[in-house]
Image: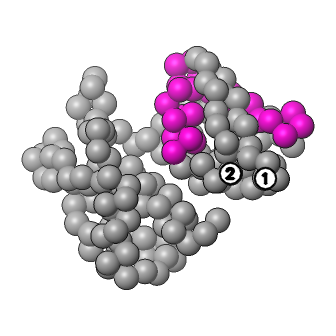
Amino acid sequence: MDAKRERHIAIRRAIKNHSVSSQEELKNILEKEGLEFAQATLSRDIKELKIVKYPDVNGTYIYTFHGENNYSSELNNPVDEKELSVRATSSLEFSNNLAVLKTRPGYAMGIASDIDSLASEEILGTIAGDDTILLIPREGISRKAVIDVLQVIIPNLSYKL
């Protein structure tokens, strides 16, 4: 994975898992993960990823993704999407060059959308049902590369080779 792609995935993960209210705060989180880059690079990344500031439940403006508000409609609390995707997936299994990811009922489309947007170099596309996702890796992409990128998106993913 190239540095820019790795940085973009880390930025998305940081914003989904933390209430980040400034570029400096975001940069500090990413530096703790071992990423090094200039402030100007972070500004460009924020623009490319269409990250905007949105008020949280306390009225503090935090980073989120354009078109999202990171809140559960039922609880009006920030959604920890990383934890949600971990709890929502049950297994990954391969058949030749294709992979099938099992999820809890109703979660497949949301997780497939994350995979499509975050793993476009490794995954050509996904097809999602209610509780199953078919992953189609790009030509020449190994199972290990698929697992590696999915584990960035879905930590603690269990899989069968």
Q: Residue reaching furthest right?
A: 96
Query: Of helix, strand and loop, which one carries label 1?
Result: loop
| Vertical position of residue 85 compared to residue 134: above or below | below
Image mark for residue 118: none
Q: Name the quarter where the C terminus is drawn.
A: top right
- Which residue corresponds to the image point at 80% horizontal and 36% vertical from the top-left? 98
- Circle 2 is placed at which residue position? 122
Identify which residue, 118 or 159, lies in the foreground. 118
- Which residue corresponds to the image point at 65% horizontal and 48% vertical from the top-left? 150
**Magenta residues, start to end:** 95-117
Rendering quarter of residue 1: bottom right
Query: Of helix, strand and loop, which one carries label 2?
Result: loop
Across and down, in percent, residue 91 comes to 72, 34
Mark 2 crowd level (few <14, some 14–19, many ≥20, 10 Å Cα):
many
Q: Does 124 sit left or right of 18 as displayed?
A: right
Q: Report the amino acid beneath label 2.
A: Glu
Residue 90 in view of the camera: no
Q: How many marks?
A: 2
Image mark for residue 141: 1
Across and down, in percent, residue 24 comes to 27, 74
Q: Does 70 sit left or right of 116 as displayed?
A: left
Across and down, in percent, residue 96 comes to 89, 37
Identify which residue, 96 or 103, lies in the foreground. 96
**Residue 102 within the segment the image draws in magenta:** yes
Mark 1 crowd level (few <14, some 14–19, many ≥20, 10 Å Cα):
some
Q: Report the amino acid beneath label 1.
A: Ile
**Residue 69 within the segment the image draws in magenta:** no
Mark with earlier residue (2, 1): 2
| Vertical position of residue 157 compared to residue 106: above or below | below
Q: Are marks 2 and 1 in contact (CB under 8 Å)?
A: yes
Rendering quarter of residue 154: top right
